[in-house]
Image (cartoon, grey):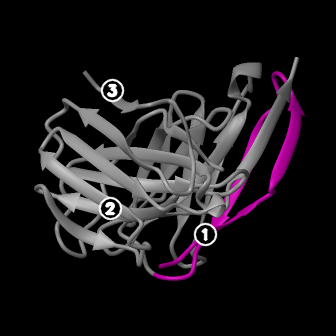
Amino acid sequence: DTEVTQTPKHLVMGMTNKKSLKCEQHMGHRAMYWYKQKAKKPPELMFVYSYEKLSINESVPSRFSPECPNSSLLNLHLHALQPEDSALYLCASSQPILSQGPAYEQYFGPGTRLTVT
Amino acid sequence: SQQGEEDPQALSIQEGENATMNCSYKTSINNLQWYRQNSGRGLVHLILIRSNEREKHSGRLRVTLDTSKKSSSLLITASRAADTASYFCAMSGRGALNFGKGTSLLVTP
């Protein structure tokens, strides 16, 4: 099974709401990622988890809170978002990366299209 | 983090023609990867080339890497309408991937 699943597919939320994005993989990958992608732009790395521990946080605002409850699941908790946070949020997984080591092929989910009103 | 520059930004060709897109980067890399993205969906990994490799093939795809010029190219031969997508190069840096700005490819029947 080489599939990464993400739920929900679409999410509309107000600026005062709290919501969560979910990602799941069953490939035994021990590295999982969150990316943000705006229209016609490349994906921007947000967070990297390696062996269920946060290893990279690309200076993401605290209104985005990641969580990795186990090796198969990755959540992104959202609170007090701004309209400019509207984007496609992509989850990916791969073999774990050694510090400063080469990146492996990443498997991406289909994304959650988030709209903040 | 480094972001690659890809050119062209957009490319329109007819079915059966070849499509070439280029990627340039700034710092040393461990490997370089190419991904395809259809209509704002998830990315699909196409090919990975290591820093000590110069050329790699996968089906209709051919990737070259010139580390002295810090550049890579992706060639899609005999293109099909289904190849219409955005293509991104991704540089393997400090344990993560940094994506280039992408090339939007349109293949018309």
What separation in Å lies between label 2 and label 1 (alpha carbons)? Answer: 28 Å
Horizontal side, residue B9 vs residue B100: left or right: right
Which residue lies at the image location 69% right of the left edge and 58% below the top edge? B22
- In the image, taking residue B56 as reference, residue B50 lies left or right, namely left
Residue type, numbered disc 3: Glu
According to the picture, the residue beneath numbered tag 1 turns out to be B4
Q: Which residues are magenta?
A: B1-27
Position of residue B88 relative to residue B108, above or below, is below
Disc 3 element? loop
Q: Front-most of A68 and B58?
A: A68
Residue B53, percent across and down? Answer: 41, 59
Amino acid carrying mark 1 in the image: Gly
Is residue A106 among the parts visible in the rendering? no
Left or right: residue B41 versus residue A40 is left
Query: In 3D space, how far apart are the residues under numbered discs 1 and 3 (Cα atoms)?
Result: 27 Å
**Tags 3 and 2 both on a single chain:** yes
Image coordinates of residue B96 in percent, x first then y, are 35, 65
Tag count in the figure?
A: 3
Q: Is residue B3 magenta?
A: yes
Q: Position of residue A89 (x, y in %)?
A: 49, 48
Q: Name the residue that disc number 3 marks.
A: A3
